[in-house]
Amino acid sequence: MDVVALSLAVSPCPNDTFVFHALVHGLIPGAPEVDLTFADVDVTNTAAERGEFDLVKVSYAALPWLLDDYDLLLTGGALGRGCGPLVLSKNGEDDLTGKTVAVPGDRTTAYLLFRLWAADRQPGKIEVVPFHQIMPGVADGTYDAGLVIHEARFTYQRYGLTSIVDLGEWWEQDTGLPIPLGAILAKKGAVDPAEATEWIRNSVSMAWANPDASRDFILQNAQEMEPDVVQQHINLYVNEFTLELGKDGLAAADALLQRAAAAGLTPAVKPFI
């Protein structure tokens, strides 16, 4: 399939800028020009539902609303172990009954995991809040607890907060599988999924082969993260599942979405394996 220019939406987080640097900068032989949009995942989840991008990074939790129009690619995403969302509170209070909890998006994997974990805990009000406002909001008492992702696991102590549950740890102990966080989708009829997979896989390989090449691009978009936090972020979220989803990655996606459907939280989808 001939592609004149490829519209791509990913987050400005270091794992995405690291992974897609080579593709975005025209360094992958045979790949088309890329029109890049940066957006948080709660934005891309809904933008993808409107069909706005050829390639898009979304939450695995959003797939039940997207797979009629998009193909799941087996590379470029974010899965792993020891990298799950955290639920934070100011004083370590772990009873969320009737409490107000800030979350980063209502179709994020983090929130879906939270809903599965909190099924018998009866939290009160849920507020969708921009990611960067969650920890300050919990610290100043605006919210009783906050659900956070990404680099927050390295920085939440600076706000005087306590982790009351690591949802990745909970998930891994319960399933033995990695946690499926972010998926890369290709719009049907707009881009050939096999070609897109090859472009992205080559971009990942090139990033690992020459990590210094993407450094300036990553830091320009890292939302004022310190270089050591940036590197921790990349080390945690760019791993073997980024290069190739594999059997365990697909099993993790199946486990998440089948459990969610059984709990009535998402529409049912066909198993991936």
Image (spheres, helix red, strand yellow):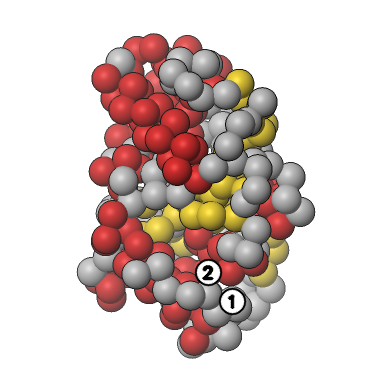
Dot 2: element: helix
Q: Position of residue 85 (x, y in %)?
A: 44, 57
The number of callouts visible is 2
What amino acid type is highlighted by mark number 2? Leu
What amino acid type is highlighted by mark number 1? Thr
Q: Circle 1 is placed at which residue position?
A: 266
Q: Is residue 96 left or right of residue 54?
A: left
- Residue visible at 47% across and 37% down in the picture: 195
- Quadrant housing residue 266: bottom right
Foreground: 20 or 91?
20
Q: Quadrant of the C terminus?
A: bottom left
Foreground: 146 or 237?
237
Neighbours of disc 2 within 10 Å: few (<14), some (14-19), many (20+)? many
Q: Quadrant of the N terminus?
A: top right
Dot 1: element: loop
Q: Position of residue 213 (x, y in %)?
A: 39, 12
Q: Position of residue 230 (x, y in %)?
A: 40, 28
Q: Position of residue 259 (x, y in %)?
A: 44, 80
- Residue visible at 60% across and 55% down in the picture: 70
Do the numbered discs 2 and 1 sit on residues whose CB atoms are within 8 Å?
A: yes
Foreground: 138 or 111?
111
- Of tags 2 and 1, which is closer to the observer? 1
Which comes sooner in the sequence, label 2 or label 1? 2
How far apart are labels 2 and 1 at the CA level? 9 Å
Q: Circle 2 is placed at which residue position?
A: 112
**Residue 189 visible to an observer of this rendering:** yes
Neighbours of disc 1 within 10 Å: few (<14), some (14-19), many (20+)? some
- Quadrant housing residue 35: top right
